[in-house]
Image (spheres, helix red, strand yellow):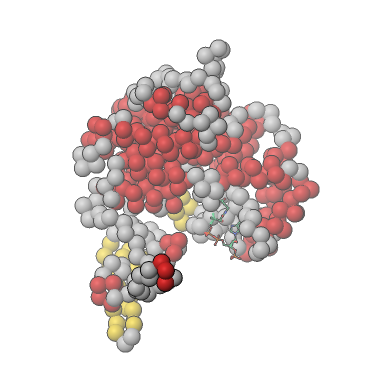
Amino acid sequence: MADTKRTATLTLDGKTYDLPVLSPTVGPDVLDIRKLYAQADVFTYDPGFTSTAACDSAITYIDGDKGELLYRGYPIEQLADKSHYLEVCYLLLNGELPNKAQMADFEGRITRHTMLHEQIHNFFRGFRRDSHPMATMVGVVGAMSAFYHDSLDINDPWQREVAAMRMIAKLPTIAAMAYKYSIGQPFVYPRNDLDYASNFLHMCFSVPAETYTVQPALAKAMDRIMMLHADHEQNASTSTVRLAGSSGANPFACIAAGIACLWGPAHGGANQACLEMLREIGTVDRIPEFIARAKDKNDPFKLMGFGHRVYKNFDPRAKVMKESADEVLDLLGVHNNPLLQVAKELEQIALHDEYFIEKKLYPNVDFYSGIILEAMGFPTSMFTPIFALSRTVGWISQWKEMISDPAGKIGRPRQLYTGAVARDYLEVENR
Ligand code: ACO
């Protein structure tokens, strides 16, 4: 963060205040208002943080107008093409791409952390069979702090490292167990001879009664889905993790908070909501009815999988995901799937409709990921858990960055109070 010595001037009630201008390595300048309240006795007002930088970060950069996403400076398209998920995890956590020895060491450590404490199996059994896997994940990840006492001290860098390894390694196991539990099948233990994505498919789809062979092309598509979801700057769930972490809460509790936030349909839950919407539309001839609803100000309906707070050109992840969707559907021989036809037609109509063009609403990553996951055999309830396990590395990287910053403060927004002014308590007989 370069201090340019430039200032912006705020004039209020005849007095002027200088606000330092901070320049990032790339992106818009930032006005430093940290001393504003002390100096001018005013707060700034920005619900939804549309113009507010809540922290500085060197992990991920998004240019919403250009449709650009960089992890530690590397474009997402290059990583999706040339890298793999665990390499991206290393990059996000450590800031640089690993050399061969570093990669082998990292992969080895992650692989040896994939099993869960056996007693956690009992914990799963306390949930109702029909629990949504996200509900189970919020509970189980939060409960990890009751099982891994030796990685709870946030002031010990080694413990922070171990907590990070544990979560990246165990989240796929937890997500797969939540799924198996919900369909009444036995839990499947991880296999150390499989890569990260293949192991996840194995834990979801194999059963003890027969051999399951992971198709490499599907494992590659899964790995790519994970890479595309690995981090996304200060989105709602990441900000939740940071806010929870700013109080000194343990890392497992913070990630559980992030999972809870991700679940909402305006965020990670959109992939499930999008596929359910495609099912509800059902046939191409009903699309105009839903487009009309999306445009109707009196109807709360939104086209799920469209729009983004930051991307106002296109979502670069969606572009890559669309290519992956075509590859997976070709591989699986899914061509006449009615859902796919509805999705393709909806995409075309929305891309050419004045309302969507004017408001810069493009298909986002969730629009295509659901189509791939459905073709792979995942039920819609697993879409958001897959997003959650992929995003865990981003949450952890951002949490670690925040904790290691000596200037860190507890997150404590202020408010524009609109309630009653001070008044005296009335005895019940006088109300
Ligand atoms: N369908 C129809 N209209 C939309 C849509 C949509 N999907 N998204 C936004 N709009 C309209 C809004 O009604 C608003 O109209 P107005 O200016 O007439 O009031 C305008 O476009 C701006 O939208 P906002 O909701 O103000 O934009 P915001 O940045 O707050 O919201 C969000 C972004 C939450 C992603 C929104 O576009 C949305 O709800 N999309 C559908 C859910 C979705 O796909 N979420 C996934 C996001 S990506 C992710 O989390 C991985």
Q: Is residue 249 above or below residue 43?
A: above
The image quadrant that residue 42 belongs to is: bottom left
Place of residue 363 in the rendered image (x, y in percent of width and height, measured from the top left): 60, 50
Query: Foreground residue, 426 or 423?
Result: 426
Q: In this view, does 123 lie above or below 410?
A: above
Residue reaching furthest front? 429
- In the picture, the quarter occupied by the C terminus is bottom left
Q: Can residue 237 be seen in this view?
A: yes
Q: Can residue 111 be seen in this view?
A: no
Q: Does residue 345 appear left or right of residue 116 in this picture?
A: right
Residue reaching furthest right? 285
Q: Does residue 219 appear left or right of residue 333 in this picture?
A: left
Who's the residue at 37% across and 21% down the image?
Answer: 118
Q: Does residue 20 appear left or right of residue 121 in this picture?
A: left
The image quadrant that residue 378 belongs to is: top right
Place of residue 102 in the rendered image (x, y in percent of width and height, measured from the top left): 30, 31
Place of residue 385 in the rendered image (x, y in percent of width and height, measured from the top left): 49, 37
Who's the residue at 54% across and 21% down the image?
Answer: 185
Q: How many marks?
A: 0
Place of residue 59 in the rendered image (x, y in percent of width and height, measured from the top left): 36, 48
- In the picture, the quarter occupied by the N terminus is bottom left
Who's the residue at 26% across and 70% down the image?
Answer: 35
Q: Does residue 208 appear left or right of residue 286 in this picture?
A: left
Image quarter for ligand 1: bottom right
Who's the residue at 63% across and 52% down the image?
Answer: 303
Q: Is residue 267 above or below residue 224?
A: below
